[in-house]
Amino acid sequence: MINLPELRLYYFGAGAGKVITYPIGVGRRGRETPIGSTRIVRKRQAPT
């Protein structure tokens, strides 16, 4: 879940009720943060 006012991503892991949070950034001024579902299609170690 993403909390836009806090600029945090919350990951609710399966099992022991563990919650991990990550800070997020917002794009350029004047452009709203897109709202919707996304998915990862490719991962790369140490991207440029």
Image (tube, grey):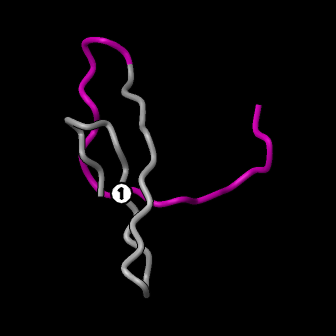
Q: Where does residue 30 sit, x and y in percent of width and height?
A: 25, 12
Residue in view at x 77 percent, y 31 percent: 48
Q: Secondary structure at mark 1?
A: strand
Please determine whether, in this image, residue 3 is positioned above or below residue 32: below
Q: Which residues make up the magenta segment?
A: 28-48
**Crowding at label 1, few (<14), some or many (≥20) Cα neighbours within 10 Å?**
some
Q: Is residue 26 magenta?
A: no
Residue in view at x 20 percent, y 35 percent: 5
Q: Where does residue 15 sit, x and y in percent of width and height?
A: 43, 87
Q: Is residue 39 magenta?
A: yes
Please determine whether, in this image, residue 12 is positioned above or below residue 30: below
Residue in view at x 43 percent, y 39 percent: 23
**Viewer-nearest residue: 25 or 17:** 17
Q: Residue 40's image quarter?
A: bottom right
Tell me the kind of residue under disc 1. Answer: Tyr
Residue that mark 1 sits on: 10
Residue in view at x 39 percent, y 56 percent: 38
Quadrant of the snapshot with the N terminus? bottom left
Q: Where does residue 32 sit, x and y in percent of width and height?
A: 24, 26
